[in-house]
Image (spheres, rainbow, N blue to C red):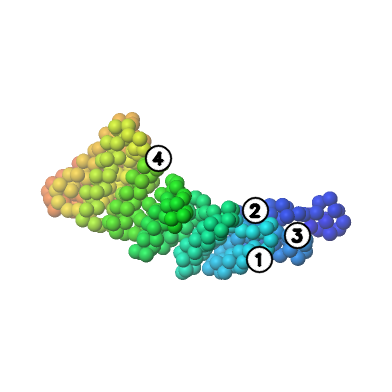
Amino acid sequence: MEQMYKEGDTLIKPDCYTYNAVLNAWSKSGEIDAAERAEIILDRMLKDAKIEPDVFTYTTVIASLKGSGRNSVKRSLELLSTMQKGGMLVRPNRYTFTTLINVIGKSGDSNAENLCLMMIEYMKELYLGGDQNSRPNILTANGILGCLARGRGLNSALEMDRMLKRMRQPIEKGGFNIRPDSISYNIAIQFFCRQNSMESILRALGLLEEMKKDHIQPGLNQYNYIIIALNKLHHEDSAKLANSIVQKMITSYEAGEKYAVPPDSVTFNALINTISRGKGLETAKLAEKLITQMHHLHHSNSYENVKPNVRSFAAVLQAWARSGQTKTAAYRAEEIIHRMEELYEVGELELPPDVYW
């Protein structure tokens, strides 16, 4: 189009919308040179076509910087400064700031958390000063949560907790008056599950209850994050808590409670793995009891994807191996392997035991 216009065809002169469409395509392309291409197009737009960019133009160029490295922070802030020096047509809005927060949050910059928090505070300041288009929304808040979720340790956990609380508070009282949504909770639950502490896992479990109070349906993945986190924690209370959560999931589901979520084989496998790290006869018996429970639930036709698999049986065999009951363990192991062979023959197990081991 540019070449045809230069050659005299005035009917197809590219305008701001044309360039914006091309910029948008590059920003969503996922190509490693997307940011570079977007900058070239912006430069051509300004210098060659003599077309004034609008707020969408600059916001899209900023979006193209996402994932392009630590220099993306410096360049995105430069673009923001250019917008703020321009007129009404390029004044940054909540979408610009939210895009900027996402770019900073994924930049890997060591100061990303502070920059993102400063940005949302600046947005609130602009809003309270009369700029209605700068009011933070749920996308902005989730961008902040996503940035905080990339951190680790006590400070990041405190900031995550503080942000979740401030989201609900009125703007006049230091908050943002934004109700968390399912994405907010999912980000926070995954974050707390990665912190490798019982306190953080209990916080994630509490967030599931907060979801229900907010009339948001928790997902199975969120329960599984918690059970898997308990499995990795190796805390003395991990097995007891994990089993309590799973059994409550079952009783709530069978009672028809609102927001109830049934477990699947991933849930049970993580639970059995957690239990199998313990020692003693009762631990092994509980592990085997759970695989029997999986089998019954699977054949009840009320549960999907809860069928025992080779990983389930492997965890039970591990529990017996650690039980300290040499003769009993050997007998039970033979019985379990025989059961696996029978299940494989009738198509209930995806692999025979000798393939897995």
Per the model, the C-alpha gap separating discs 4 and 3 is: 48 Å
Q: Residue at x 55, y 67 (%)?
A: 73
Query: Given contact means CB atoms under 8 Å apart, are the residues at marks 1 and 2 in contact?
Result: no
196 and 357: which is toward the camera: 196
**Of tags 1 and 4, which is closer to the observer?**
1
Per the model, the C-alpha gap separating discs 1 and 2 is: 26 Å
Q: Which mark is residue 51?
A: 3
Q: Which mark is residue 25?
A: 2
**Of tags 1 and 2, which is closer to the observer?**
1
**Image side of residue 91 versus residue 190, left or right:** right
Query: Given contact means CB atoms under 8 Å apart, are the residues at marks 1 and 4 in contact?
Result: no
Element under disc 2: helix
86 and 281: which is toward the camera: 86
Element under disc 1: helix
Circle 4 residues within 10 Å: few <14, some 14–19, many ≥20: few
251 and 340: which is toward the camera: 251
Q: Residue at x 26, y 48 (%)?
A: 242
Element under disc 4: loop
Residue named by callout 1 = 85
**Sequence-wise, which precedes: disc 4 or disc 2?**
2
- Residue 213 spot, x, y in % from top left: 36, 42
169 and 200: which is toward the camera: 169
Per the model, the C-alpha gap separating discs 3 and 1 is: 17 Å
Residue farthest along the right direction in this orientation: 8
**Sequence-wise, which precedes: disc 1 or disc 4?**
1
Q: Which mark is residue 215?
A: 4
**Image side of residue 248 versus residue 102, left or right:** left
Q: Please state which amino acid type lies under the numbered disc 1.
A: Lys
Query: Given contact means CB atoms under 8 Å apart, are the residues at marks 4 and 2 in contact?
Result: no
